[in-house]
Amino acid sequence: MNKFGIATVAVMALTGAVSADFRTDAVEGAIDGTHLLRNMGSFSKSQLNAMRGVSQKASALYSVNWGTDSNGASYSVGNLAPSVGNAGQGGWNTYATGTGTNMSNYKINAGRPAGSAAGSGVKAFQMTSSSTTGGRYAYQDLSSQWAARNAGDNIFWGEYQSYFSASQTSIARTGNIAFDNTGSKILSGMYTNTGASTSSTVARGTVYGFANYNNAGTVGNFIFNLSAGGGPVANAGGWTNYAYNFNKTSGRVEWFLSTDGGANYTGFFVDGAAAGSDVLETDFYSSVGTGNASAGNMIFGAAEFYATPAPGAAALVGLAGLMARRRRA
């Protein structure tokens, strides 16, 4: 597929010429979550399901548990792909910027740390960051599935579960994002700081949400600090559940985080700038910046991607009542 050269994730600018890949080492534009984010409050899993409507997951796009996937592929323990830029297991491709392209940075593990939803004996995907600077990407093309989705299913969803050790010192940030079909926009996604940062403002477990956003006239891809102002942080030495979406019709982006195994979620949203965009791919993504001195690992459990219609009127009425009760509390 053709991919456009991108200058930075902070403010995306097309190069005007088709290049080998649109991914580059990126320094994201960070926005304080306490200022521009809209906090949606906390929700039980059943309430989150109600928000997605009775037809939730109606258009199943892709899912993987790292043993098998929805395309019928089976995965073997070892490297995900043979080399950077060449398709690997299950059709996954890899890409790297900065230093180091060792394929053991992307590997299938025989088991998972205890506490995952699927148990400790199930395969997992491990992504290892650079020890200095650079990015890691493992990506799956979803464009054909998105094009074939049910009519009206214009909200793209991604869900995943991940684990990182409480002892690692790398300040890598790792998670999952979705690109649009031009490669110029990150439609939505989330990632987490896995180590103890040298900056007192970025604690271990800080969670960020990605969105293509109009920041006071500057349109680009930005990260929002979901943990700012006392917001939730990911479990260090434990599993965290993530869910995010992008509404093609309105451009709205929502992020949900659960630290109790998916029983309850805290939600946030912004009105993004990518309305009308279509989904190209999902990327497991890791980046590090200046000052990092060691590699960091993130282990991923099952992930799924699907599309839903906008919630029905009944679900919206119920949500409005829930939010009203929370405001009065």
Image (cartoon, helix red, strand yellow):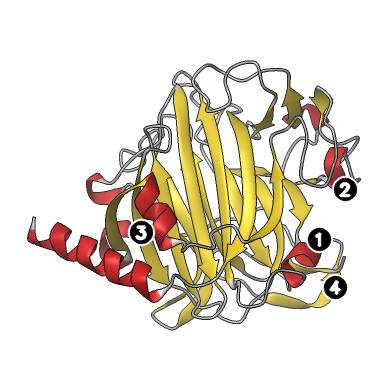
Marked residue nearer the N-terminal end (1 or 2)? 1
* Mark 4 residue element: strand
Tell me if 169 is positioned left or right of 143 in this view. left
Query: Mark 2 highlights which residue?
Result: 85
Q: Amino acid at mark 4?
A: Val
Residue 181 occupies quadrant: bottom right
Residue 162 occupies quadrant: top right
* Mark 3 residue element: strand
Q: In the image, which disc is placed on residue 18? A: 4
Q: Residues within 10 Å of mark 3 (few under 14, many from 20)?
A: many
Marked residue nearer the N-terminal end (2 or 4)? 4
| Residue 38 spot, x, y in % from top left | 30, 65
- In the rendered view, would you say 195 is above or below 187? above
Residue 204 occupies quadrant: top left
| Residue 194 spot, x, y in % from top left | 48, 33
Query: Mark 3 highlights which residue?
Result: 268
